[in-house]
DNA sequence: CCGAATTACTCAGGGCACTGATTATTTCTT
DNA sequence: AAGAAATAATCAGTGCCCTGAGTAATTCGG
């Protein structure tokens, strides 16, 4: 008795969604490059020369996790790490040719995978889905960083 | 160039949502018991005496992960593992009094946390949110298990 | 200019999540 | 009844995710 219905628990649903995505990614996109790794490659395509911490911020990975992910990508020759001559604490990151090639290849496959993943939803539902996911995530992230309010009411 | 907008990638959004939830859970529910652990306790409140594999199926954890989670809960005295006398491969699982107490306590806190987590959404939006999350997850899980079709069309 | 605070990164430790291989037990087939 | 197939659980290995503590470099305040 007193058991709860997990289907109304957003955390449980989020975990299930992420796991389902993980499996489909593995089957349809890549067994070597993970989704967070792709996010890092993508961030460096958009803004080459970012430092490690900023890349983590862009893709939503904390300092420890981004360090591991970068280290793997660097070990596989997909990106280069060089000390910032202006600030000896930072490493500046840049994709190698191989890294850029990998990003291009996975971009195509990822688009295909997203079609399959979102197949059960209509175009309108997809837009709603994205919007709801983003609103909840943004709000929850805002709870941790009360520094920059999302809406400034004058 | 050719960088992609991650805000239309459900996998990326799912990961962010899950991370946001993880942090809020830690802050508002418990630093000792995790959300998957709570799901296991909850499954055993609903159906005491389940075996390990079935519990994993109920809460969406694979054979390896459920083994680790059960082992932690058992080590902390929240559940008991006994060999099934009918089938020597299985372990039958049952909450201890302490486990049941913990489940009751966390049920209350989890409800409070969900209120905060879902605060940005109206009641109607929450219903839509749950439904979309579930439809996408169910469909993706169905891709892996083509054994039991979700809809039987006569 | 120099000590204090801040910042970027690293490291150790705990937990979740998957795959592939192994072991023990049960069930199926002949 | 005996060998083959299936099943429950374990183990090793990889990767993501967080916290708290530590190190090196820079910036801030007096």
Image (cartoon, coloured by chain):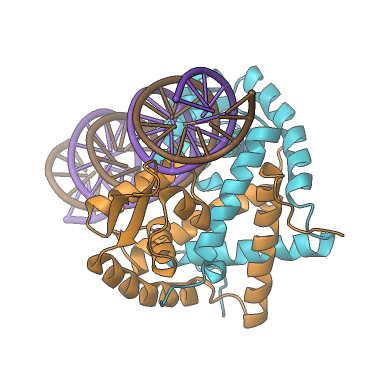
Chain colours: A cyan, B orange, C brown, D purple
> Quadrant of the rendered structure where residue C3 is?
top left
Please give left or right for residue B48 compared with residue A133 in the image: left
Q: Nearer the viewer, residue A134 or A121?
A: A121
For residue B128, above or below residue A76: below
For residue A119, above or below residue B44: above
Residue at point 78% right, 39% down? A112
Residue at point 49% right, 44% down? B62
Q: Position of residue A45 (x, y in %)?
A: 65, 33
Residue B81 visible in the picture: yes
Q: Quadrant of the C terminus of chain B?
A: bottom right
For residue A140, above or below residue A89: below
Instruction: Give the number of marks.
Output: 0
Residue A62 visible in the picture: no
Q: Position of residue A29 (x, y in %)?
A: 69, 33
Q: Nearer the viewer, residue A145 or D12?
A: D12
Please give left or right for residue A6 compared with residue B89 in the image: right
Residue at point 50% right, 70% down? B117
Q: Nearer the viewer, residue C19 or A89?
A: C19
Q: Quadrant of the N terminus of chain B?
A: top right
Q: Nearer the viewer, residue B54 or B99?
A: B54
Please give left or right for residue B102 compared with residue A42 in the image: left
Q: Position of residue B24 (x, y in %)?
A: 41, 64
Residue at point 68% right, 68% down? B131
Q: Position of residue A99 (x, y in %)?
A: 63, 23
């Amino acid at each position: 008795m007193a058991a709860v219905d997990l289907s109304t628990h957003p955390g449980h649903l989020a975990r299930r969604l992420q796991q389902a995505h993980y499996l489909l990614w593995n089957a349809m996109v890549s067994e070597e490059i993970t989704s967070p790794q792709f996010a890092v490659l993508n961030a460096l395509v958009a803004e080459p020369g970012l430092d490690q911490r900023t890349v983590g911020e862009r893709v939503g990975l904390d300092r420890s996790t981004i360090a591991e992910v970068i280290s793997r990508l660097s070990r596989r020759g997909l990106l280069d790490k060089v000390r910032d001559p202006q600030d000896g604490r930072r490493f500046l990151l840049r994709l190698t040719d191989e890294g850029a090639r990998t990003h291009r290849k996975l971009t195509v496959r990822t688009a295909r995978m997203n079609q399959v993943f979102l197949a059960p939803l209509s175009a309108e539902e997809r837009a709603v889905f994205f919007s709801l996911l983003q609103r909840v995530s943004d709000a929850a992230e805002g709870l941790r960083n009360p520094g920059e309010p999302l809406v400034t009411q004058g």
